Image (cartoon, grey):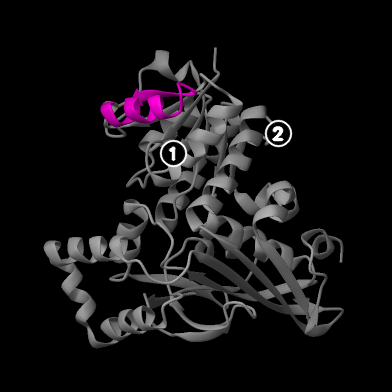
Amino acid sequence: MKERIVVVGGYGHVGSMICRELGEKYPGFVYAAGRSLERAERFSRETGGNVLPMRLDLDQPVMESEWERIKLVVMCLDQTDDAWVAACLRSGTHYVDISANAEFLSQVAKWRDAAEEYRSTAVLSVGLAPGLTNLMVSLAGQSLDVTESVDISIMLGLGDRHGKAAVEWTVDNLLSTFQVMENHRFRTVASFSDGRSVHFGSKIGRKKVYRFPFSDQSTLPHTMGVSAVSTRLGFDSTLLTSILAGCRASGLHRLLKVKWIRNAAVQAIMNLKMGSDAVALRVDAYGQLHGKVSKVECLLVGRDQSRLTAKVAITVAEAVYKGDVPSGVFHIEQVYELADMEDWIEKEISVEVRRDGVRGEDSFAGQIES
């Protein structure tokens, strides 16, 4: 009988948060899975047995007898191909993914017909960015008749505790070039280039943000029909943001190709104890309303990016586990709205919406109703 929830990477930084909360609601049915059975067993003991251990290697196939027991997989690790996900969906097992690799997510999207055939559900772009950013774009678009372009800006606090996988992904992508959609055409841009100064509200103020390859800018043009989407990243430390931009502009970022330098950079960022754990997301949507040029701004401010990622994943995972999402492959904005997460968002973050320069109510409910 399919009843298990398997969190792949479940003893990692974000995965452990997901496991703990789901384990409290479904004790004995949640499994923290990964290559190290020892780490999984240690984590299981920390949860008092609410979460159970499982050894799982994505490079190895899962036995059919195991798929018969697994109802839902929550994926917290990056993957290089879609073979494992395909096996998951073909087994009738549901799938939730918190990764931000645009190329991989586009591969998974191709399994939509198979998911419908085997009555499985996959929800992608689940987390902070992509995730909350997608839902903010959707919210902003509801105030426009036509959404023509969107600028997404992300500010992360360095005082937060960051998981190793997230830091590695960030450092590795400082080297990248990637494609963005502009006026229905693809254009290649460089990571940490084309900086902009963005105001993140009175508490945080103005910060510089630079282009970064978050997958929301690759998927939103297709799911929401927007002709141009850009996503930029910055940190609460103006100094570090400037250093990274300077390294990119001067070509020094290429030193990250040297393994020991790359590893040292990852470790330095993980050990960095400066700034706050604040998180700020801003969406500027441009388009038409009643035949006139219009702009909608949406600002979200909270704390602890890892916890926010976990909370979004938990909300989606529960809905999929209960059968509240239809069969198929979806990005989060295709089956959710920000209001669907109101129960925890009200307590943990603030959301403000400004339409053509008019600021809405301060409460989250006010934003949704206005």
Q: Judge left or right: residue 275 versus residue 240.
A: right
Residue that mark 1 sits on:
16
Name the residue at 69% across, 53% down.
347
Can the viewer see residue 125 in this picture? no
Tell me residue 243's x, y (percent).
31, 82
Name the residue at 34% across, 83% down.
245
Q: Judge left or right: residue 266 versus residue 154.
A: left
Tell me residue 283's x, y (percent).
63, 72
* Residue 261, magenta (yes or no): no
- Kind of element beneath mark 2: loop
For the N terminus, the image quarter is top right
Tell me residue 123's x, y (percent).
57, 43
Residue 324, label in figure: 2
Q: CA distance from mark 1 to mark 2?
A: 24 Å
Tell me residue 165's x, y (percent).
33, 52
**Front-most of 311 and 254?**
311
**Front-most of 221 and 26?**
26
Image: magenta residue range: 38-55
Name the residue at 14% across, 61% down.
259
- Check the image and report above or below for 120 versus 244: above
* Residue 53, magenta (yes or no): yes
**Front-most of 325 and 39?**
39
- Check the image and report above or below for 248 versus 16: below
Can the viewer see residue 138 in this picture? yes
Q: Judge left or right: residue 345 versus residue 363.
A: left
Q: Estimate how packed mark 2 is, as few (under 14), some (14 to 19) or many (20 or more) residues with alpha carbons within 10 Å.
A: few
Which numbered disc, 1 or 2, marks the residue that appears first in the sequence? Answer: 1
Which amino acid type is marked by label 1? Ser
- Please identify the quarter of the rendering in which residue 315 is found: top right
Q: Estimate how packed mark 1 is, as few (under 14), some (14 to 19) or many (20 or more) residues with alpha carbons within 10 Å.
A: many
Which amino acid type is marked by label 2? Asp
